[in-house]
Image: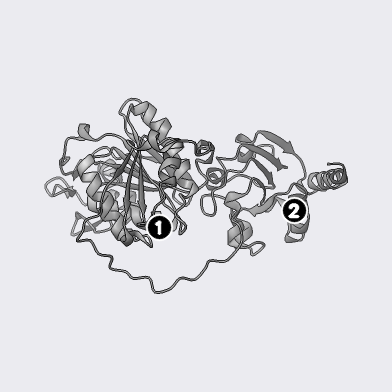
Amino acid sequence: MAGLRVDETRCIGCARCVRACAHGGIKVEHRLAHPTDACVFCGACIDACPVDAISIERDEAAADLSVYRDIWVFAQVDKGGAVLPVAFELLGRARALAAQRACAVVALLPQGPNGTGAPERELIACGADRVLTVHDARMVPLDAEMCAGWICGLAQQLKPEIILYGATAFGRELAPMVAVRLETGLTADCTRLEIDEATGLLQQTRPAFGGNLMATIECPARRPQMATVRPGVFAGDACACPVTVSDDAVKDKIVTCPLDASARPRVRVLATEPAQQGASIAQAKRLVVVGRGIGSKKHLPLMQRIARALDAELGCTRPLVEAGWLEYPHQVGQTGVSVAPELLVSIGVSGAIQHLAGISGAKTIIAINEDAQAPIFGIAHYQVVGDAIEIVNNLVRELESAAPRL
């Protein structure tokens, strides 16, 4: 069985492994190291051991990985049966990855019994080579356990190389269920997905250690490789084409895969409560994002004025939410909302790594900051160095005086 192993004949009880472990995964008792249940098999203790007494024993791969092929995208639908935008964002990224792997892109579409066929045509128009779907009353409302059983059955039969999910509330519930059943890895909240040219592995990049660094994760010994991605991260890759594909053109690309007749949901929905009304800043085409560089909460009305003048929504960084200046729905970044507007005006934002990860999909970024070395300038298309309040006051006067002439 796989696990951390300590050679008792070599271990000298120096405890260097304990100091090297950030997870409490190893301890020393009676001058001998012992792994604990907290071990995550990171290997830090192995590198720290001066006598090579520690090793990791891994299980052999259960199957020939060369038989796995194609990239699958889970296409979640809303209550009205429409595919969520994040599915199209993932399809766009999957097409680029599939070009490198010379494989097909497959959409997974669970639906109720009264599907119209429009979602299938839309997915194919936006990059899916095939759509695997099911029309079943047990999929209304979407049940994570039922979906996981359906996906796992297909995956065991067809052996996909990669499966991507949107990091919605449902996607975050579904993906771990599939990963556990298929005994494979899962990387959550990815901000980048790339193919390693040398190995062909999916490189899954996400913030780690509280957003202080970006970790690139691979799954070399298990398949499928799986990741969740927040809505808005790959918005630039999303399909914007209209649905023009005819029924005749897609009939051979749609495969109905029935759900197991014996499957039954264990959860019954008795009632639902609507979420708080109001559009999310994730869908904003224009966005003004403010940070601690604006100096004080008293300057928020000025920021709201420039947002109105630009017909934009107002967002902020995490410290402003923690200080109580704005509510959490306004928070932009990997710990808040990932956004991809056409225009993003960043005011007084230094650019912490998790914030930059959350705005990487923006098409045009204008950054205003008095620190010429601020990290935000590294990704901004236009940089303005100077006092944020003075610059914004001048911009507001110009925009509001020009408004009647526009």
Specify the amino acid type for callout 1. Answer: Phe
Callout 2 secondary element: helix
Which percent across, then down, holds residue 254? 33, 40
Q: Please tell me which residue is depicted at 44% across the width and 54% down the height of the picture.
A: 81
User: In the drawing, what numbered circle is on residue 255?
Assistant: none
Callout 1 secondary element: helix
Which percent across, then down, holds residue 306? 77, 50
Q: Please identify the quarter of the rendering in which residue 374 is found.
A: top right
Q: Looking at this rendering, what residue extends furthest in the left direction?
A: 9
Number of callouts: 2
Neighbor class of circle 2 (other Cα within 10 Å; few <14, some 14-19, many 20+) is many
Q: Examine the rendered structure and indicate whether residue 67 appears above or below residue 171.
A: above
Q: Is residue 88 visible?
A: yes
Quadrant containing the C terminus is: top right
Q: Please tell me which residue is depicted at 54% across the width and 46% down the height of the picture.
A: 358
Q: Sequence order check: which comes first, mark 2 or mark 1?
A: 1
- Mark nearest the camera among 2 and 1 is 1
User: In the drawing, what numbered circle is on residue 170?
Assistant: 1
Q: Please tell me which residue is depicted at 33% across the width and 71% down the height of the picture.
A: 268
Neighbor class of circle 1 (other Cα within 10 Å; few <14, some 14-19, many 20+) is some
Which percent across, then down, holds residue 203? 37, 36
Which percent across, then down, holds residue 227? 37, 45
Residue pointed to by mark 2: 303
